[in-house]
Image (cartoon, rainbow, N blue to C red):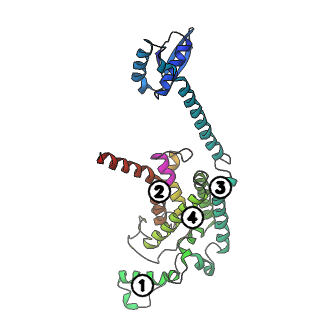
Amino acid sequence: MREMATPADAHDAKILVDYLLTQKIVAEVRPEQGKPVVWIHNEDDMERATAIWNEFRTQPKDSKYVAAQKPAQELRKLKAKVEKNYAKLYFDADHFWGRPHPSRVPLTVTLIILSVIITIWTEFGSNVQHVRMLYFMDPPVMPLAAENAGNKEKLNEEVKNAQLQPYKRGEYWRVITPIFLHFTWWHLIFNMYALYSLGGIIESRRGIVWTLFFIFITGALSNLMQFLYPRLFDLNAHHGIEYGVAFFGGMSGVCYALFGYLMAKTLYAPEPGLHIPKDVIISMLVWLVICMTGQIGPIANTAHAAGLVIGFTIGVLPKAWKKIRQLISSGQK
């Protein structure tokens, strides 16, 4: 903020400030030693503001300056309304322990309830009969043809075909239902906490339909990637396609997709209310790497990484597409 001018009286100072506002220069009047002093908020505007002031003081009664009073008043009203709505967004978001109130995020709450019920119903994965109704594939099987045992590629293909039988029977819901399977209490609690914290923010801004579509797409794709490439992001394991060797489930892929979306909005395409602190971003990425080391047990790392990439891509896509269109448009001129 810098001092820019000292008009003859308060009336002239107000007219100057109003005109500057219509030129997208924010300024204010401060009385100092009985005189009105005009201060410019943004240092970058100083050069333009000074040029306007030099012209203004030679003819302060010019009609263009007087006519700027009404537009400036409308701009101030609009600014006040935007700031009020912006503040309301954050008040609503912080209404319940710094997160959206449960009444404002019915989809997120419903997903949490379903996850808890299904986890208990499947007895944390120990009830095989119940699990196989919801699992991505049929339980791992070994091929009957013994001669394929030495041919890894053929072995994987045979196992894959056997495990994808549910989809040939029309059980397409199994592409998404593994997100509701959890195998330990800490697994369930951690995922539900992340779902409420991240999913609640997004649902309160984007609405039920958008969030439901987002969760379905990211959940299904992260499950599919985990099935196809179960060892791809395991840092201490052999890389490659190994169908049927990993039993997976949980909301983690979706949670990392929600995190990826909010990370994109925070770092690349900011929007009111769609923001997470940078220390949370760092801690989530560090946790992702720790999981990949295998030091805390078997983890569906591919689902985590796939969810993160998909969520981040969805977050940056609108702004990236807008820039691409602008480049194409400018190139055609």
Q: What is the crowding at mark 3: few (fewer than 14 residues within 10 Å), some, or many (at least 20)?
A: many
Residue nearer the viewer, 236 or 231: 231
Give neighbour class at mark 4: few <14, some 14-19, many 20+ (Cα, 10 Å). many
Residue 109: x %, y % from top left: 66, 59
Pick whichever of labels 2 and 1 is earlier in the sequence: 1
The residue indicated by pointer 1 is 158
For the residues labelled 1 and 3, the Cα–Cα distance comes to 44 Å
Q: Quadrant of the C terminus?
A: top left
The amino acid sitting under disc 1 is Glu
Above or below, 118 relative to 203: below
Q: Residue at x 54, y 76 (%)?
A: 172
N-terminal of the pair, mark 4 or mark 3, is 3
User: Which kind of residue does numbered mark 2 sit on?
Assistant: Ile
What residue does disc 3 label? 105
Residue 40 falls left or right of residue 73: left
The relative height of residue 303 versus residue 158 in the rendered view (above or below) is above
Q: CA distance from mark 4 to mark 2?
A: 18 Å
| Residue linked to disc 4 | 251
Give the percent coordinates (x, y) of residue 254: 54, 62
In whole angstroms, how far apart are the C-alphas of marks 2 and 3? 21 Å
Question: Percent from the top left, x then y, of residue 206?
Answer: 57, 53
Q: Residues within 10 Å of mark 2 (few under 14, many from 20)?
A: some
